Amino acid sequence: MTQQLSAEDSRYDRALTAATQAIVMLAKEPGRFKALTTGLEQYGESFAAFLLAPEAKEVFAGDLHDMYRRSYFFTGTSLKDATEQLIERSGWRQTLEALQRGAGGAAFPRWDEPRLREVLAEGYELIPAITGVHVFDRRPLAVEYED
């Protein structure tokens, strides 16, 4: 008999993985602990989520606050809400609506949800946490580390 994780078990598994990553990251560089505590005081949970972004793991502890401020975009209530907000803020929804109007009301294809998530993941890091899904722009982090 095959057991599948429920959505709650899956969230719990991701939370344990993130917590383990955070502990290891904080233990490797003592300056990160100080950056975390001051970041939590200044920015709340979204700063802790930022530390779990793959790019943030490479940022020197002294630069974390600046990189957070440059990359934090917003917090959505859920993954679906965060995705919808990104579509809205990028102007894609208006483009799709214009195409639909131009087609004279003809049925227009819906978003390819898996592909849409792939495209958004190229430019944004969406990190689920307790209070919602924190969204970070990857561009400020990528610019920092270009050769």
Image: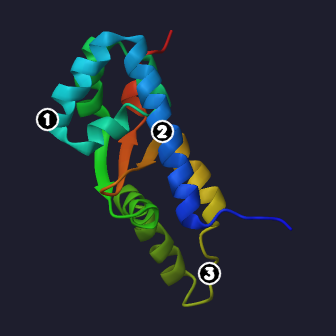
Asked if residue 142 can be seen in this view, the reply is: no
| Badge 1 density bin: few <14, some 14–19, many ≥20, Cα 10 Å | few
The disc placed on residue 18 is: 2
Residue under the point 86% across and 68% down: 1
Q: Is residue 136 above or below residue 95?
A: above
Q: Secondary structure at mark 1?
A: helix
Question: Residue 105 location in percent, x, y?
Answer: 55, 90
Front in this rendered view, residue 96 or 36: 36
Instruction: Give the left or right position of residue 62, taking residue 11 as reference.
Output: left
Callout in the foreground (2, 3): 2
Name the front one of labels 1 and 3: 1
**Residue kind at label 2, given as amino acid type:** Ala
Judge left or right: residue 58 versus residue 109.
left
Relative to 17, say whether 24 is above or below. Answer: above
Q: Colour scheme used in the picture?
A: rainbow
- Circle 2: element type: helix
The amino acid sitting under disc 3 is Phe
Relative depth, front residue between 142 and 24: 24
For marks 1 and 3, the one nearer the N-term is 1
The secondary element bearing badge 3 is classed as loop
Q: Are marks 2 and 3 in contact (CB under 8 Å)?
A: no
Q: Vertical placement of 105 versus 139: above or below? A: below
Which residue position holds label 3? Answer: 108
Q: Which residue is mark 1?
A: 41
Residue 116: tell me if it is visible. yes
Residue 14: percent from left, percent from top: 53, 47
Residue type at mark 1: give it. Glu
